[in-house]
Image (tube, helix red, strand yellow):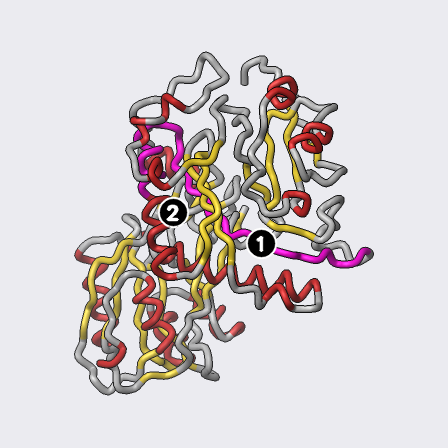
């Protein structure tokens, strides 16, 4: 970071709060140039009150809350049971799209992803587009307003916030499963803050600012040089440095082992929702099986010996994700897993009556996704008498596999699979 007088800049230039219907209901925080974090102890309703809020500081990065609150000042923590639960008035639907490290190549990927995501949202949801921001660094932010106010009419403040978080989490899962690489920490978190348009990105010196759809539809290189830059030494490389496998493995480990930083992934339960003891057979093959002919011979033998109808095969380049969407008794799945030498999964199924399996890539703190499972093929055994898991057939469609449920006469359980977002450190 250069020696830059942020304080003087914000006294002479305006941040952009004009698009927020009631900025005074949002919380404002900033990171000072010396690394300290501060938050506003007054409501920010205008440029003048914003300047008064930051007057004693030199804020290098400025953020605002994605939620609106009846009282946004000194919000109690979620774990604080000594104070009344804050009243959530609104929660913007926000997507943060970044591709690291900073380069023209990655900015173009982020732009295309943001545009495609907006078009997908427009086709599938009745949300009002409020704003699009260039973040000032590696990507873009999309802001929507949820026109359905049903959840915000829940009288109990804690239940209201939890219901909104649950609804946003469902949306996040749909977006991730549709293949859009968004930051999973942002959308479903009602206590999240995000960079304020009109503020300088403290690391790059570029202005975070709102852009229109026309600019989002245009190649980044045609307009990036027009973005105000307040540092003289910023050079955006043409292409990103390619990480080799050794570098990636330093960060991405088997998800059952400890990692040195946070990682984010999505998991599905093998239990059939709506049934008592029915399970689907889902697992990642051991690393020792590889991803070649020997692995597929083992899986073909499993399907034949287990009299399974069919399975879908995915690969992350190192292992195979096996998903058999049949409705199988828990006892049979336990036996199959034991026969395969997967005692840990087998024991989880016996003790907890289900287990969780990763179905997404793994995202690091740098915003990059690794080990994403790609669909390979379907292996069939033509067992027409099988009963299928309705929820896991749905899962396969979410993962991009063309499934016609009408071709399956015997279907068991509810339609939606149990999916969760996991954060590990």
Viewer-nearest residue: 328 or 84: 84
Q: Which mark is residue 181?
A: 2
Quarter-of-image position of residue 218:
top left
Q: Position of residue 200 (x, y in %)?
A: 54, 26
Residue 190, position as x, y percentages in the image: 60, 53
Of residues 64 and 122, the one nearer the viewer is 122
Rendered position, 10 above or below 87: above
Q: Earlier in the sequence, mark 2 or mark 1?
A: 1
Which numbered mark, 2 or 1, is in the foreground of this view?
1
Left or right of residue 44: residue 275:
left
Where the N terminus falls, by quadrant?
top right
Q: Which mark is residue 91?
A: 1
Quarter assignment of residue 324: bottom left
Q: Which residues are magenta?
A: 83-112
Residue 344 visible in image: no
Residue 138 visible to an observer of this rendering: yes
Between residue 132 and residue 262, name the one nearer to us.
132
- The correct choice, above or below, for 64 with respect to 318 in the image is above
Distance (Cα) linking label 2 and label 1 = 21 Å
Total labels: the figure holds 2
- Asked if residue 98 is among those painted magenta in the image, a careful observer would answer yes
Quarter where residue 334 is shown: bottom left
- Frontmost residue, 78 versus 380: 78
| Disc 2 and disc 1 in contact, CB within 8 angstroms | no
Residue ID at (37%, 83%): 412
Point 58% across, 61% down: residue: 164
Q: Which mark is residue 289?
A: none
Q: Check the image and report above or below for 105 versus 259.
A: above
Please check the rendered image and state whether residue 59 is part of the magenta-colored stretch, yes or no: no
The residue positioned 46% from the left and 36% from the top of the image is: 210
């Amino acid at each position: 970071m250069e020696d830059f007088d942020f304080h003087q800049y914000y006294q002479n230039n305006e941040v952009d709060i004009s698009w927020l219907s009631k900025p005074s209901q949002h919380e404002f925080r900033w990171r000072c140039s010396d690394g300290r974090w501060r938050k506003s102890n007054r409501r920010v309703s205008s440029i003048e009150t914003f300047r008064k809020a930051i007057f004693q500081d030199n804020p290098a990065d400025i953020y605002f809350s994605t939620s609106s609150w009846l009282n946004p000042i000194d919000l109690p923590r979620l774990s604080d049971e000594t104070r009344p639960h804050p009243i959530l008035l609104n929660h913007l639907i926000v997507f943060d799209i970044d591709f690291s490290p900073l380069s023209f190549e990655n900015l173009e990927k982020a732009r295309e992803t943001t545009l495609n995501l907006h078009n997908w949202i427009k086709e599938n949801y009745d949300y009002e587009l409020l704003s699009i921001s260039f973040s000032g660094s590696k990507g873009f932010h999309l802001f929507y307003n949820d026109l359905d106010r049903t959840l915000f009419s829940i009288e109990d403040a804690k239940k209201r916030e939890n219901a909104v978080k649950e609804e946003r989490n469902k949306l996040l899962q749909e977006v991730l499963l549709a293949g859009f690489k968004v930051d999973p920490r942002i959308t479903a978190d009602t206590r999240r803050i995000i960079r304020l348009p009109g503020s300088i990105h403290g690391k790059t010196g570029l202005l975070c600012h709102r852009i229109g759809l026309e600019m989002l539809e245009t190649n980044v290189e045609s307009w990036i040089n027009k973005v105000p830059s307040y540092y003289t030494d910023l050079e955006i490389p043409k292409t990103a440095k390619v990480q080799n496998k050794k570098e990636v493995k330093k960060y991405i480990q088997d998800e059952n082992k400890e990692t040195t930083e946070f990682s984010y992934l999505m998991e599905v339960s093998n239990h059939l929702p709506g049934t008592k003891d029915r399970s689907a057979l889902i697992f990642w093959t051991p690393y020792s099986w590889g991803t070649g002919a020997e692995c597929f011979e083992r899986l073909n033998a499993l399907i034949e010996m287990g009299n399974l109808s069919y399975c879908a095969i995915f690969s992350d380049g190192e292992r195979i994700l096996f998903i058999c969407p049949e409705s199988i008794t828990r006892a049979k799945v336990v036996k199959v897993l034991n026969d395969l030498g997967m005692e840990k999964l087998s024991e989880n199924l016996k003790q907890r009556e289900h287990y969780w399996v990763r179905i997404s890539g793994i995202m690091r703190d740098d915003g990059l996704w690794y080990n994403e499972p790609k669909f390979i093929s379907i292996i069939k055994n033509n067992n027409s008498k099988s009963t299928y898991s309705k929820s896991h057939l749905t899962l396969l469609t979410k993962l991009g596999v063309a499934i016609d449920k009408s071709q399956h006469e015997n279907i068991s359980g509810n339609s939606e699979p149990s999916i969760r977002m996991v954060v590990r450190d």
